[in-house]
């Protein structure tokens, strides 16, 4: 079992920055990949970013490349999502997820455990 708890969401203005955190507990954090997804009202959950177990390999969806950075601190069992230059279209509930067997895949179905989500709202 893996438990994931996100934090760091909030209400910001366009152009601002936020850093989301996801604290993991349960199985050995350094052994599995982590991803961030988001879901806006009325839309399907979409992939945002992922990192492999060591953090050396990262993947991003095109709409956040150059603005968002995923990173992890295995000593703290935490994965982060640094979000810069936020836009109103980034407004969504953001979820972190654990991929126990992959290297940070983009499909939501590939992930085994999910956090409860944290709301990010970007006003124009």
Image (tube, helix red, strand yellow):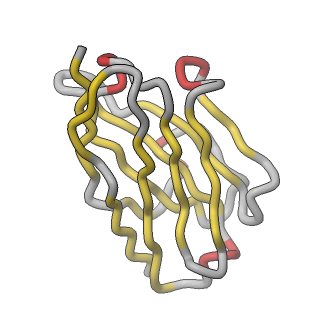
46 w.r.t. 123: above or below: below
Q: Residue at x 50, y 32 (%)?
A: 84
Left or right of 54 on screen, residue 24: left
Among all residues in the image, which is located at the extreme right?
A: 56
Locate residue 9, reporting x and y percent. Answer: 29, 48
Q: Position of residue 70 (x, y in %)?
A: 61, 47
Most foreground residue, 3 or 88: 88
| Number of numbered labels in the structure image | 0
Vertical position of residue 46 compared to residue 32: above or below: above
> Is 6 in front, or is 100?
6
Q: Residue at x 52, y 44 (%)?
A: 82
Query: Which of the image's four quarters has the N terminus?
Result: bottom left
The C terminus lies in which quarter of the figure? top left
Q: Quadrant of residue 114?
A: bottom left
Outermost residue toward the top?
Answer: 124
Determine whether 25 is above or below 5 in the image: below
Question: What residue is drawn where x is 27% and y is 38%?
Answer: 120
Q: Residue at x 77, y 65 (%)?
A: 54
Residue 14 rendering spot, x and y as whole percentages: 33, 20
The answer to which image quadrant residue 58 occupies is top right
Query: Residue 108, percent across and down?
Result: 47, 43
């Amino acid at each position: 079992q893996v438990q994931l708890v996100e934090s760091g969401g909030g209400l910001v203005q366009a152009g601002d920055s936020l850093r989301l955190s996801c604290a993991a507990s349960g199985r050995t954090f350094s052994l599995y990949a982590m991803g961030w997804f988001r879901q806006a009202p009325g839309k399907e959950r979409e992939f945002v970013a992922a990192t492999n177990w060591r953090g050396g390999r990262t993947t991003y969806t095109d709409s956040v490349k150059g603005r968002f950075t995923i990173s992890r601190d295995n000593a703290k069992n935490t994965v982060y999502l640094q979000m810069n230059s936020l836009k109103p279209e980034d407004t969504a509930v953001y979820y972190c997820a654990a991929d126990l067997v992959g290297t940070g895949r983009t499909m939501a179905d590939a992930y085994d455990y999910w956090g409860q989500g944290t709301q990010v709202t970007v006003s124009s």
